[in-house]
């Protein structure tokens, strides 16, 4: 066990050595850690959840939100949750492959969702719920899917066709699907923590990114990227998760109120996600610091033609049955571009 792991385990022991009955007079504390800015959809959703929890429980439960990797970074947070040092996270869907739950990488497939409506048929339907159950053997309870938005490519040179990404070092989240996606474009995938991306772009360690607009804007990546192409080729969303031991130890009435607060926060977050990205896109335009290109029909078709083959390349990893289930649910036909 590493020194950090030992420290986290000690913190977890301190938390669970105190009976819940002893906490009756003081607010029960939930630490909610995430890696993005407070004014992103996820950041706003976390704050909304904290507010509703306080209201619904009459102050019996307090949610402390730690944004921008102030508590744990990308590579640390899942371990911290499993050790009980933090109670709640909202990691991106791509991270669950690191836990061995590869099925979540279905969400990383390029161009598998044409709209939020198609996406929500999966995240808010039986498929999404079935994937939550695969987290339970890891000591994790899945509570909700939160949208961020659809990702687009940025770089310091124009990206008009797939060939324009050839040889570029592109930052990605840790996902075999995203690695395959970049290789399909002849780009070089570089896995990197979200908190490190701005400096890496500034120093030229990586050449570009794929991000929803809200991430690109709130992290000021547009200051070190001169071109953005609205490919909207992939989805970036989150699963709000909680430590299973902590969750199951909660009194039933409090847990019920937290579930209702989470439903409200999910509705709120998913409603504002597109609005936030649209507002931030306008802010990017007004900044004058980044050229924004909207692909033509022919250019978008070229990107799809280059990326759709990643679906079958990754089918054996994610699960052919799961892939076909998503196709049926959304009506997606990979043979029609």
Image (spheres, grey):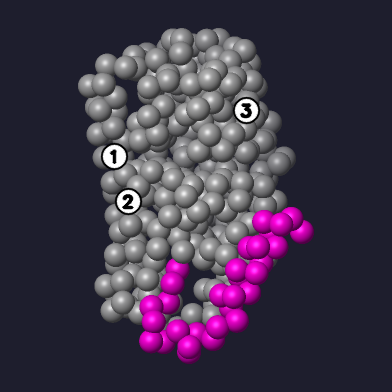
For this view, does 2 lie left or right of residue 188? Answer: right
In the image, which is nearer the foreground, mark 3 or mark 1?
3
Disc 2 target residue: 44
Q: Quadrant of residue 9?
A: bottom right
In depth, the one of 90 and 112 nearer the eye is: 90
Task: From this view, report whether residue 242 is shown above or below residue 245.
Answer: above
Count of numbered marks:
3
In the image, which is nearer the foreground, mark 2 or mark 1?
2
Residue at image coords 54%, 51%: 72
Query: Residue 215: image x %, image y %?
Result: 40, 35
Query: Residue 229: image x %, image y %?
Result: 40, 19
Q: Are marks 3 and 2 in contact (CB under 8 Å)?
A: no
- The disc at residue 190 is 3
Disc 1 target residue: 276
Between the residue at mark 3 and the residue at mark 2, the CA separation in whole angstroms equals 29 Å
Report helix, strand or loop for mark 1. helix
Q: Are marks 2 and 1 in contact (CB under 8 Å)?
A: yes
In depth, the one of 102 and 328 nearer the eye is: 102
Look at the image and tell me in which quarter the N terminus lies.
bottom right
Return the disc, 3 or 1, that comes first in the chain's sequence: 3
Q: Quadrant of residue 311?
A: top right
| Residue 191 appears in view | yes
Between the residue at mark 2 and the residue at mark 1, the CA separation in whole angstroms equals 10 Å
Question: Is residue 96 one of those drawn in magenta?
Answer: no
- The disc at residue 221 is none
For this view, does 103 lie left or right of residue 26? Answer: right
Residue at image coords 39%, 82%: 26
Q: Which residues are magenta?
A: 1-30
């Amino acid at each position: 066990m590493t020194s950090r792991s030992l420290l986290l385990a000690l913190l977890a022991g301190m938390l669970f050595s105190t009976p819940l009955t002893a906490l009756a007079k003081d607010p029960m504390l939930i630490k909610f850690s995430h890696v993005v800015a407070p004014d992103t959809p996820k950041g706003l959703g976390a704050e909304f959840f904290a507010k509703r929890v306080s209201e619904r429980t009459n102050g019996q439960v307090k949610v402390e939100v730690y944004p921008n990797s102030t508590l744990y970074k990308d590579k640390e947070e899942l371990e911290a949750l499993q050790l009980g040092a933090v109670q709640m996270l909202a990691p991106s869907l791509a991270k669950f492959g690191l836990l061995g739950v590869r099925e979540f990488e279905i969400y990383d497939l390029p161009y598998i969702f044409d709209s939020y409506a198609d996406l929500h048929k999966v995240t808010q339907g039986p498929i999404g719920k079935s994937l939550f159950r695969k987290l339970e053997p890891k000591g994790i309870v899945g509570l909700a899917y939160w949208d961020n938005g659809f990702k687009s490519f940025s770089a310091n040179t124009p990206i008009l066709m797939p060939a324009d990404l050839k040889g570029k070092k592109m930052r990605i989240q840790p996902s075999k699907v995203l690695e395959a996606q970049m290789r399909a474009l002849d780009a070089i995938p570089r896995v990197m923590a979200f908190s490190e991306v701005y400096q890496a772009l500034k120093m030229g360690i990586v050449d570009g990114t794929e991000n929803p607009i809200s991430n690109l804007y709130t992290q000021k990546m547009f200051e070190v990227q001169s071109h953005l192409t609205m490919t909207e080729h992939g989805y970036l969303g989150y699963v709000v998760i909680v430590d299973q031991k902590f969750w199951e130890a909660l009194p039933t009435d409090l847990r019920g109120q937290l579930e209702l607060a989470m439903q409200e926060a999910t509705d709120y977050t998913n409603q504002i996600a597109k609005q936030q990205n649209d507002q931030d896109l306008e802010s990017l335009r007004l900044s004058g610091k980044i050229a924004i290109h909207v692909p033509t029909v022919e250019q978008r078709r070229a990107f799809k033609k280059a990326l759709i083959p990643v679906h079958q390349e990754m089918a054996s990893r994610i699960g052919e049955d799961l892939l076909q289930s998503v196709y049926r649910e959304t009506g997606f036909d990979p043979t029609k571009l």
